[in-house]
Image: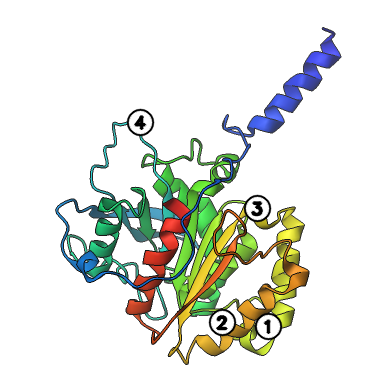
């Protein structure tokens, strides 16, 4: 083989591996999923489980990405499933879940060592086989240099990719073999992001800006603010067109990501903005990127209406119970 041919092959290999030595080829798409039909949670799922996971705290360094790049330390909570062994070869999917307005990283699981409804729910989902053992990270968008929640959520995707994912997935047993961008992209179908209310707006911004790095999305009771606050209700068609074009710009179609979203029928805060956006997203002209289906083997989008649900944690629990197994079940 000539010298020029060897150089060309070497360059191709380096391009496919990327910096840090992690292949950039993504994880394969799953072929089997539970049905998307929305069901209520059996009451026993809120009873303490004898195979409960552990909630820990981690800190990591980040910066004010939307401003003057000041560095600071942040805290996030980590749920490790029962039986997690740092010395084993078992790898875990990771779900990142963002709190709502006025909340903190403790909104979902509470303080360390607590055993609230959210934790008992996830414990029992894993014990009963509804959900594969997975890691759940609950961060905060709060920024000491800017108290504007919209600003913080809009810019959080940069913190997620550059700081939080490396801090979490570089420490625990995950599918991310290298925490550079090539490694994060290669493991995107083992990673989800979701959130409630303001955290749902954050989720849509992550979807818009970090689709290369996250494959699953669970926005609960919140629309996309890509074109302005509440634009899912005031400009649903424009917002849907914008989001569809963003997906196409990535070179992706409906087989490359999944969205399980929902809202309560009594939610007069988020419902009037979320429902119109969903109606626009599932129009025929966007079916190449948002394909509504009763099972994710046939599509990538599902909208759940919780009958009688309000803008509260009860609705969050129902969407977690129904949505997470579609990602990591």
| Numbered label tally | 4
In the picture provided, is 264 more to the left or to the right than 46?
right
Marks 4 and 1, the one that precedes in the sequence: 4
- Residue 236, disc: 1
Q: Quadrant of residue 125?
A: bottom left
Residue in the foreground of this view, choosing between 172 and 32: 32
Q: Position of residue 102 (x, y in %)?
A: 38, 81
**Residue at left 40%, top 48%?**
168
Marks 3 and 1, the one that precedes in the sequence: 1
- Residue 274, disc: 2
Marks 1 and 2, the one that precedes in the sequence: 1
Residue 65 in view, yes or no = no
Q: Position of residue 160 (x, y in %)?
A: 50, 57
Spatial CA distance of label 3 from label 1 is: 23 Å
Residue indicated by mark 4: 89
Spatial CA distance of label 4 from label 2 is: 41 Å
Spatial CA distance of label 4 from label 1 is: 46 Å
Of helix, strand and loop, which one carries label 4? loop
> Is the residue marked by circle 1 packed among few (<14), some (14-19), or many (20+) residues within 10 Å?
many
Of helix, strand and loop, which one carries label 2? helix
Spatial CA distance of label 3 from label 2 is: 23 Å
Marks 4 and 2, the one that precedes in the sequence: 4
**Residue at left 63%, top 37%?**
25
- Residue 255, disc: 3
- Residue 313, disc: none
Pointer 4 and pointer 2: residues touching (CB < 8 Å)? Answer: no
In the picture provided, is 20 more to the left or to the right than 120?
right
Q: Give the farthest residue toward the top.
A: 1
């Amino acid at each position: 083989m000539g010298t020029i041919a060897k150089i060309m092959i070497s360059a191709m290999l380096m391009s496919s591996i990327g910096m840090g030595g992690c292949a950039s080829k993504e994880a394969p798409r799953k072929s089997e999923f539970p049905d998307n039909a929305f069901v209520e949670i059996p009451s026993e799922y809120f009873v303490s489980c004898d195979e409960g996971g552990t909630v820990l705290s981690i800190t990591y360094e980040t910066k004010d990405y939307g401003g003057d790049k000041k560095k600071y330390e942040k805290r996030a909570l980590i749920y490790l499933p029962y039986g997690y062994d740092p010395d084993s070869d078992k790898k875990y999917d990771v779900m990142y879940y963002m709190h709502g307005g006025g909340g903190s990283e403790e909104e979902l699981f509470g303080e360390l060592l607590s055993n609230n409804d959210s934790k008992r729910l996830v414990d029992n989902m894993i014990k009963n086989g509804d959900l594969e053992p997975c890691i759940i990270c609950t961060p905060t968008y709060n920024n000491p240099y800017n108290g504007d929640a919209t600003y913080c959520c809009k810019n959080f995707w940069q913190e997620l990719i550059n700081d939080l994912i490396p801090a979490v997935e570089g420490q625990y047993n995950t599918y991310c073999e290298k925490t550079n961008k090539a490694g994060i992209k290669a493991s995107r179908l083992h990673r989800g992001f979701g959130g409630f209310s303001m955290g749902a707006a954050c989720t849509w911004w992550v979807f818009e800006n970090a689709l290369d790095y996250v494959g699953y999305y669970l926005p609960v009771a919140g629309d996309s603010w890509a074109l302005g606050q509440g634009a899912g209700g005031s400009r649903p068609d424009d917002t849907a067109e914008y989001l569809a074009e963003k997906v196409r710009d990535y070179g992706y179609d409906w087989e490359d990501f999944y969205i399980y979203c929902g809202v309560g029928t009594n939610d007069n805060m988020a419902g009037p903005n979320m429902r119109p956006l969903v109606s626009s997203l599932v129009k025929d002209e966007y079916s190449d990127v948002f394909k509504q289906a009763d099972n994710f083997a046939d599509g990538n989008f599902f909208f759940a209406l919780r009958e009688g649900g309000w803008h509260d944690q009860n609705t969050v629990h129902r969407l977690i119970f129904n949505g997470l197994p579609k990602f990591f079940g």
